[in-house]
Amino acid sequence: MLGQVSFDTDPLEEAISQVWKDEFDRSSNEDHDHYIKPIKSLHEGYGYAAERFTMLAFEDKQIKSKISDLLGNLSRRDPGIVNGILDNIFMLSCLAAKEAIRLAVIAQRISSEINFDDLPPAAYGEDEDDENKITYEEAGDN
């Protein structure tokens, strides 16, 4: 159902669902920084989704790097260094969660705003029927 994500009764999942709904509403509100105009085509939707995925992948890469740093510093037993790395992992994980929620919002917006019944076969990677196929004339030598 639009604007709702269904989870079990886990409080964290309920909180994520509420944050998702709030972000969905913000992305549809022209007065908000995260506003996304109505999505009119699958290609446009793909562009938004790819942008969010790129941001999520960037945060994931940063987290992996910090996890490696943590492993490399386990034997040092220096609380200052370890706590600094753990703080970075916390911050980067929060940023990744934000990007994951924004990607989920984009996916739902695409699903709800694109009328899949009106899309031409080419939108699905299928060939057009002969009646609607565009033909091109060969350019002759002039």
Image: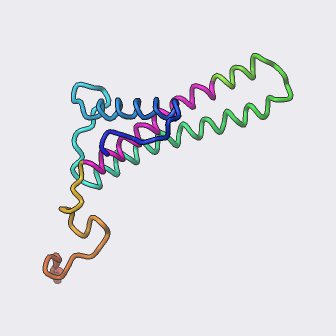
The residue furthest top is 80
Q: Is residue 89 left or right of residue 57?
A: right
Residue 91: % across, % down: 57, 25
| Predominant secondary structure, magenta span | helix
Instruction: Judge whether 46 appears above or below 25 on screen.
Output: below
Q: Which residues are magenta?
A: 88-112
Residue 124: % across, % down: 30, 66
Q: How is the image coloured?
A: rainbow
Q: Is residue 23 left or right of residue 140?
A: right
Pick whichever, 15 or 141, lies toward us.
15
* Screen quadrant of the C terminus: bottom left
State the image quarter where residue 34 is shown.
Answer: top left
The residue furthest front is 9
Question: Is residue 108 inside the magenta stretch?
Answer: yes
Question: Is residue 98 inside the magenta stretch?
Answer: yes
Q: Residue at x 34, y 52 (%)?
A: 46
Pick whichever, 113 or 2, lies toward us.
2
Q: Residue at x 57, y 40 (%)?
A: 60
Instruction: Judge whether 21 appears above or below 44 on screen.
Output: above
Q: What is the count of numbered marks?
A: 0
Instruction: Judge whether 26 appears above or below 7 on screen.
Output: above
Pick whichever, 92 or 14, lies toward us.
14
Q: Residue at x 21, y 66 (%)?
A: 120
Pick whichever, 9 or 97, lies toward us.
9
Q: Residue at x 16, y 83 (%)?
A: 140
Residue 18: % across, % down: 40, 30
Q: Is residue 81 left or right of residue 23?
A: right
